[in-house]
Image (cartoon, rainbow, N blue to C red):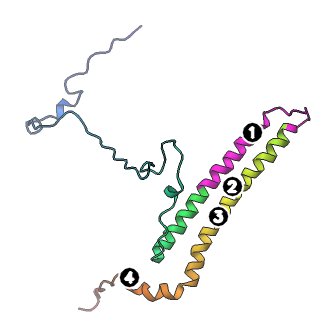
């Protein structure tokens, strides 16, 4: 047996909350304007991706401005993060390539020949992923070495960067 649905009762659409104060009319246009400002720099979009959808190296790293310890940290951390991300993507690509190429039949008909050929080719891409992972490690090690080598200069100006301490109220002294 089919049941008929009744129209919503009074107030079901939120009209019960309307009061004399809420019924004041004000000009409110019924449209929205969205502005997307993607400025281009030498033909590349502002998000760092060109028109063909590929990323550019400039989008992955900040400018190499090493004028302060914070800038050195920012650059090394950005390099580490980009290398880790790329390492994961390349490792996945190597596994996908291995699987796709293993499906190509061996021309000589050798058993497991297609898998062997696919592994040889994908091994090179896997080594690229390992190199990117090592680049991430070296970027972190670079900042660590910077801190160790320039510890004296960093500590010399560190006290100037601290906020002045607030006076402590001693409630026992009355």
* Residue in the picture at 71% in, 47% down: 94
Give the magenta part as a residue range. 85-113
Q: How far apart are marks 4 and 3 (CA)?
A: 33 Å
Q: In this view, does 28 lie to the left or right of 60?
A: left
Q: Is residue 41 left or right of residue 164?
A: right
Dot 4 surroundings within 10 Å: few (below 14), some, or many (20 or more)?
few
The answer to whether 73 is drawn above or below residue 98 in the figure is below
Sequence-earlier tag: 2 or 4: 2
The answer to whether 57 is drawn above or below residue 116 in the figure is below
- Percent position of residue 136, x then y: 62, 64
Q: Mark 4 points at which residue?
A: 162
* Residue in the picture at 47% in, 65% down: 63
Dot 1 surroundings within 10 Å: few (below 14), some, or many (20 or more)?
some
Sequence-earlier tag: 1 or 4: 1
Dot 3 surroundings within 10 Å: few (below 14), some, or many (20 or more)?
some
Q: Distance between the residues labelled 1 and 2?
A: 17 Å
For the C terminus, the quadrant is: bottom left
Q: Name the residue under label 1.
A: 99
Q: How far apart are marks 2 and 3 (CA)?
A: 10 Å
- Any mark on residue 135, and which? 3
Q: Mark 2 points at which residue?
A: 129
Could you tell me which secondary element the residue under label 1 belongs to? helix
- Percent position of residue 62, x then y: 48, 63
Q: Is the magenta stretch mostly helix, strand or loop?
A: helix
The answer to whether 79 is drawn above or below residue 35 in the figure is below
Q: Is residue 133 left or right of residue 65?
A: right
Q: Distance between the residues labelled 2 and 4?
A: 41 Å
Could you tell me which secondary element the residue under label 3 belongs to? helix
Dot 2 surroundings within 10 Å: few (below 14), some, or many (20 or more)?
many
């Amino acid at each position: 047996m089919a049941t008929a649905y009744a129209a919503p009762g009074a107030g079901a659409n939120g009209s019960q909350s309307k009061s004399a104060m809420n019924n004041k009319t004000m000009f409110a246009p019924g449209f929205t304007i969205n502005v997307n400002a993607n400025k281009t720099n030498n033909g590349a979009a502002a998000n760092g991706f060109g028109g063909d959808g590929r990323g550019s190296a400039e989008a992955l790293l900040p400018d190499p401005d090493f004028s302060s310890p914070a800038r050195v940290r920012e650059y090394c951390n950005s390099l580490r993060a980009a290398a880790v991300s790329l390492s994961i993507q390349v490792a996945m690509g190597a596994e996908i390539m291995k699987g796709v190429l293993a499906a190509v039949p061996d021309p000589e008909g050798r058993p497991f020949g297609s898998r062997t050929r696919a592994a040889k080719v994908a091994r090179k891409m896997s080594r690229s992923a390992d190199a990117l992972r090592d680049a991430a490690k070296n970027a972190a090690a670079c900042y660590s070495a910077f801190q160790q080598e320039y510890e004296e200069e960093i500590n010399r100006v560190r006290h100037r960067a601290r906020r002045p301490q607030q006076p402590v109220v001693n409630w026992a002294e009355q």
